[in-house]
Amino acid sequence: MLHDRGSDRSLESLAHSVLWPGFTGTRAPDWLLRARDAGTPGALLFAHNIDPDDAGQVSRLVGELDGTRGSLVGADEEGGLVTRLHARDGSPSPGHAALGRHDVAADTEIVAEQIGAELARHGIAIDLAPVADVNNNPANPVIGSRSFGADPELVARHTAAYVRGLQRAGTAACAKHFPGHGDTTTDSHLAVSRMDVSADELEEIHLAPFRAAIEAGVRSVLTAHIIVPVLGPEPATVNPRALSMLRGMGFDGLIISDAVEMEAIASTLGIGPGTVAALAAGVDLVCLGNQGADPRTPENPHPDEFAYRTVHTAVVDAIRSGSLRAERLEEAAERIAALRTWVAAHRTSGGADGSPGTSETAAPGAPPVAPNLPTATAARVAAHACDVRGDVRLRADAPVTVIDARVLRNRAAGREADLVGRALAARRAISHHRFDAAGTAELLRADPPGEVVLVVDQPHLAAAERHALTDVLAWHPDTVVVRLGWPGDLGVDLPRLVTTHGSSAVSASAVADLLLG
C-alpha cells in the first residue's frame, strides 16, 4: 500500500508529484488510483494498456486516471516503428525517417498534427515525440529509422515542424533524447551508452535539433541515459552539467527522464538512487516505463507497483536526509502544473494557436479523420520515401512466396507486426514463411517458387539477416528484397530492392502498391 503518515503527507505528496509510472492492464489499477489521489500527476501508456478491439477503451482509461483535476497521460506515438495506439496493426502515419526522406516540412507538420489530434481525442496530453536525434552512426541499434536523418539541418527542420504540428492540435510535444542518442552503438535499454564526440561536434550536430525544437516552443524534453564525456562521467539523465546546458539553451519547460528501469540506470545506480540523482540533476518528471511487460514471479507479482513504491520511498528518504532539496521538487511540480494548464487551455481553444488546423483536419461539423486509416498526406509521404532499385513489380501470373527474415527487435518499439506480409496478402494470395536456413532452402528448391519477396530490417547490423539475404539470393537470384530499417551499406548487389525508411502500415501499403502495381 502507498504510505500515509499524517504529518509527512505533504512531503510524500511532493514525492508523488514528480513520478510518472507505467502499469499493467487496460484498466487503471487500484495502486495507481491511490497514487493519483496522493499527488501523482499522470501515467505513461504502452501497447499492453491498449485494447485495439474496443474503440472507447483508451478514452475511458484516461478518464479513470483524470480524477477530479485532470492528469498528464503520455504515450510514445512517433508514427512508423514506435506506436502504442496502433501496435497490433501498424501506424497509419509514416515514421521519422520516411518524413525526412520525403523532406517536405509542411507535410511533416500535417502528419504530426494528425497524430496530436488523435491523442487529443483520447485525452492523452503528452506525446513523447519528436525524436530529435541525428542518426549519423549507421550502427546505431535503437534510433535508426526513428530519426529524421543523418544531417543535422534536416533533422532540425523536421523536428521543429513536428513540434509545431503536435502542439497545434493541443498535444504537448517532447523532443528526445537529449543531448542526442544518434551517434551511439549501444541501446541504453540494455546498458550504458556513450557518445564520444567533441564539444564542437556536440554543438553543431547533436544539439542543433534541440535548439530548433526550443525555438518552435516545445513544451517538454526527454533525457537520454548516455554518457557524453565532454559533459562529464554520468549519463545525461543524472548529469547536472548536461541539464544545466539544456536550461542554458533557453528551455524553461518540463524535463522528463527516460525510463529509469532501463538497464543504463537500473543496473548501475538502481531505480531508487537513479530517480533521486535525476531529480537532483534537474529532471522534473521521472518516468517509470514499461514495468508491465516484465515477467511476474511469486515473490513479486506486481512489478509495476513495486517499482513505484521503490522510487517513491527513495525520494521521500532523500528529502528527509537532506540529500535532495524539497525546493527542487517544488520547482518541478510547478513546471508539471504549468504543462497541465497549457494542455487544458489549448484543447479548450481548439489548438495551440487557435487555428482550425490543416486542410486534412476535420472542419467543424465534419466527421473526424479515421484514426486507423492513412490520410492522403501520409500515403504520399510513405510512397515518396520508398527508394526502388530495379523492376520490383511481381508477375501477375506467378505464385508469390514471402519470407520474413527480420531478427532485430527495437526495444523502444516492442512487438512488431508483419505489416508487409499483411499488406500483400490483403490484395493477392501469398505463401508466407519465417526464414530458417534448412526449411527455406527446401522450400525454394522443391518447386519453382514463382516470385520471392524477402523482408529484412537492418541486415547491415544483423548477421543473421545478412546470411538470410545471401542464402535466399543464392537460391533465388531474382528475389525482391524489402528493407524496412535504416539504409546501411549492405555490401551486396541487389537487383530488386525497396527501401521504405521505416515500418508502418502506410509504408507497407506503399510497398504493396509498388510490387503489385
Image (cartoon, rainbow, N blue to C red):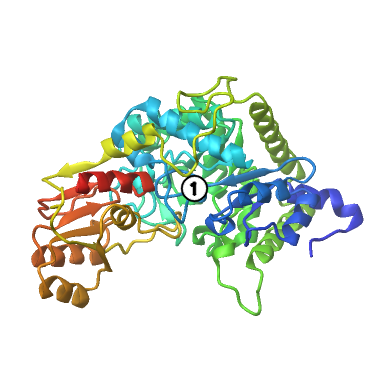
Q: Which residue appears at 76% of the width and 45% of the height?
A: 326
Front-lying residue, 358 or 44 = 358
Which kind of residue does numbered mark 1 sit on?
Ala
361 shown above or below 405: above
Q: Quadrant of residue 317?
A: bottom right
Q: Quadrant of the N terminus?
A: bottom right
> What element does badge 1 sit on?
loop
Front-lying residue, 317 or 190 = 190
Q: Which residue appears at 72% of the width and 57% of the height?
A: 32
Q: Quadrant of residue 27?
A: bottom right
Say whether residue 183 is visible. Answer: no
Say whether residue 4 is visible. Answer: yes
Q: Quadrant of the C terminus?
A: top left
Q: Which residue appears at 80% of the width and 42% of the height?
A: 68
Residue ID for mark 1? 224
Q: Is residue 11 left or right of residue 242?
A: right
Where residue 294 appears, x then y in whole percent?
A: 55, 68
Where residue 12 appears, x then y in whole percent?
A: 80, 53
Where residue 412 appears, x then y in whole percent?
A: 46, 54
Q: Which residue appears at 20% of the width and 48% of the height?
A: 515
Q: Residues within 10 Å of mark 1 (few under 14, many from 20)?
A: many
